């Protein structure tokens, strides 16, 4: 990993704002509207940040939004990049590592995912309790920088149980149905075949997608507490009679925006009150 690039990105951000966030949220496909609810926001497009990779997929705005939700000091990543866009794992996690050096202690990862568990339905939310890394890639491959984290980080609790339980608690308090499950990370950009979906189901996955895993690994490497939420935007191949499209993903995300935002704001308010 090239720490010099991360430091360059940090300095680029610090030249535009002196705001120091405690919590970062990475917003997945179609979920960017949460950023509209950040108070006294400071917006920095990725294009203005040295070394930051720029998203090429619709539904990923490509902006950092700094500000507060109640007492919580937050930075929102409005969009991310993926391995399938041609980026290395190291490049994919550079934004998360940058926010880590800026000072975040908590990372909330969100994504749009396909439902693998047949009990799930499009439009439901799932707290990520664990993941399967099936991307044939790991952002820690190569020389380790001990100043960022240990060579062999423990992943027993990759998704912090206390934070995950808080998300469920907030959902119940607001009358929002929520599932718990395992997320399988694939490379993409093709949607999975029915055989691949059956494979990950046998392996224990409840949802499947093309992001999140590398960011979770990098954050854990840096000692950042991680939790995650998947929006089930469609049922995976073989579990639905219709062909999968990115338009369907965005449409379901748009429909789920209201309760997704409601849940995330509640979680942030609770985290802010706890500090």
Image (cartoon, rainbow, N blue to C red):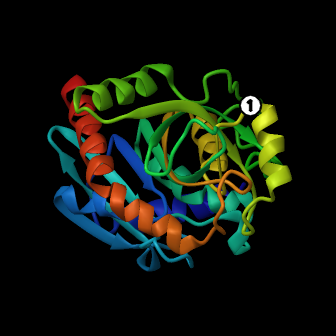
- How many C-alpha atoms fall within 10 Å of the one at disc 1: few (<14), some, or many (≥20)? some
Could one spot residue 3 in this view of the protein?
A: yes
Residue 57 x, y percent position in the rendering: 55, 76
**Residue at x 49%, y 21% (from the top left corner):** 161
Q: Is residue 247 above or below residue 165?
A: below
Most foreground residue, 46 or 81:
81
197 left or right, relative to 224: right
Residue 225 x, y percent position in the rendering: 49, 31
Could one spot residue 87 in this view of the protein?
A: no
**Residue at x 57%, y 79% (from the top left corner):** 56
260 left or right, relative to 251: left
Secondary-structure class at tag 1: loop
Quadrant in which residue 177 is drawn = top left
Residue receiving disc 1: 204
Most foreground residue, 134 or 104:
134
The quadrant the C terminus occupies is top left
Quadrant in which residue 157 is drawn = top right
Give the number of marks.
Answer: 1
The quadrant the N terminus occupies is bottom right
Residue 219 x, y percent position in the rendering: 57, 40
Most foreground residue, 232 or 64:
232
Residue 30 x, y percent position in the rendering: 43, 65
Q: Is residue 17 above or below residue 74?
A: below
**Residue at x 19%, y 45% (from the top left corner):** 69
Most foreground residue, 206 or 263:
206
174 left or right, relative to 130: left
């Amino acid at each position: 990993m090239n720490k010099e690039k991360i430091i360059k990105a940090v300095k680029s951000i610090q030249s535009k704002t002196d705001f120091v966030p405690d919590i970062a949220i990475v917003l997945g496909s179609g979920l960017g509207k949460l950023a509209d609810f950040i108070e006294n926001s400071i917006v920095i497009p990725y294009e203005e940040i040295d070394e930051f990779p720029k998203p090429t997929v619709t539904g990923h705005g490509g902006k950092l939004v700094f500000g507060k939700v109640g007492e919580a000091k937050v930075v929102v990543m409005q969009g991310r990049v993926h391995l399938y866009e041609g980026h290395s794992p190291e490049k994919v996690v550079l934004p998360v590592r940058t926010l880590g050096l800026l000072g975040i202690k908590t990372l909330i990862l969100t994504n749009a995912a396909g439902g693998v568990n047949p009990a799930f339905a499009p439009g439901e939310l799932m707290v990520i309790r664990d993941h399967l890394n099936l991307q044939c890639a790991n952002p820690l491959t190569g020389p380790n920088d001990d100043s960022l984290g240990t060579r062999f980080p423990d992943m027993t609790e990759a998704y912090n149980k206390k934070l995950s339980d808080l998300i469920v608690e907030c959902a119940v308090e607001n009358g929002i149905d929520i599932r718990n499950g395992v997320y399988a990370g694939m490379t993409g950009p093709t949607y999975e075949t029915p055989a691949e979906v059956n494979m990950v189901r046998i392996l224990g996955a409840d949802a499947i997608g093309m992001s999140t895993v590398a960011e979770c690994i990098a954050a854990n490497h840096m000692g950042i507490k991680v939790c995650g939420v998947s929006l089930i935007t469609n049922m995976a191949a073989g579990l639905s009679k219709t062909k999968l499209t990115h338009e369907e993903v965005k449409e379901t995300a748009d429909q789920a925006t209201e309760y997704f935002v409601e849940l995330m704001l509640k979680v942030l308010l609770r985290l802010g009150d706890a500090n």
